Image (tube, grey):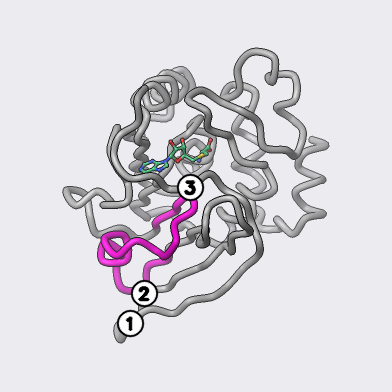
Amino acid sequence: MQLILTLRSLGVTDARVLAAMERVDRGAFVRGVFASRAYEDMPLPISCGQTISQPSVVGQMTQALNPQPRDKVLEVGTGSGYQAAILSLLCRRVYTVDRHRALVEEARAVFSAMSLANITAFTADGSFGLPEQAPFDRILVTAAAEDPPGPLLAQLKIGGIMVVPVGQSDTLQTLIKVTRLASGYDYEELRPVRFVPLVEGLGAG
Ligand code: SAH
């Protein structure tokens, strides 16, 4: 509950997003010594040297994505699965991909324990999107790219929205909202963020 108040004070005001974040127990996605900090507004380490994002950033990104109940959504960067679980309560179908097989397997186990049956998780290089399931109403990228990847732009429906952190790794990145119009793409800068980089190819574990 304290976390929900923090989210509100940091600009997450969409009632559906707040309700989804209240229902998804972040503690289920964090293991070991960090589990006790799951309800604080901070990023935390997960397996494979990756991080589960800060709840306020998850809330702001989800709100910017503006997912609708009938939407088919792609998330690039499954990580712990926390963001995908929130999306699964807000839209019809969620596809999520990560380059680390171990993370995908752990996230699948949590989805199944939570009976989140509308999420499909794959091990893949998400910079190429998921051509078999494209096009998507919404695409959320949770790793930073130097530019919005071309295949992801191409897999967005007209009228669709993509939210993606853009910038060099290890420097300040900017969260961008891309809207696909009939005539091209509209880009809006949202806020500075810091994400792990989008890396090509599959991970070691
Ligand atoms: N959304 C996650 C946090 C993601 S951390 C959560 O809710 O916990 C970023 C993730 O992006 C990492 O797990 C990393 O392995 C993954 N990643 C980085 N480059 C990738 C790529 N090219 N394709 C798929 N996943 C990638």
Q: Residue at x 82, y 54 (%)?
A: 9
Coordinates of residue 88 in the picture (x, y in percent): 45, 41
Q: Circle 2 is placed at which residue position?
A: 180
Disc 1 from disc 2: Cα separation? 6 Å
Q: Position of residue 21 (x, y in %)?
A: 63, 40
Quadrant for residue 123, please give it.
top left
Q: Which dot, 3 or 2, sits closer to the camera?
A: 3
Q: CA distance from mark 3 to mark 2?
A: 24 Å
- Residue at the image point whose x is 48% and y is 33% from the top: 79
- Quadrant assignment, res 35: top right
* Magenta span includes 149: yes
Residue 162 rendering spot, x and y as whole percentages: 43, 62
From the viewer's perspective, is 25 left or right of 3?
left
The residue to which callout 1 is attached is 184
**Amino acid at pointer 2:** Arg
Name the outermost residue toward the left: 132
Crowd tier of the residue under label 1, counting other residues whose Cα lies within 10 Å: few below 14, some 14–19, many 20 or above: few
Q: Is label 3's Cβ within 8 Å of ligand 1?
A: yes
Mark 1 touches mark 2? (CB < 8 Å): yes
In the image, what residue occupies the spot 37% across and 55% down?
Answer: 71
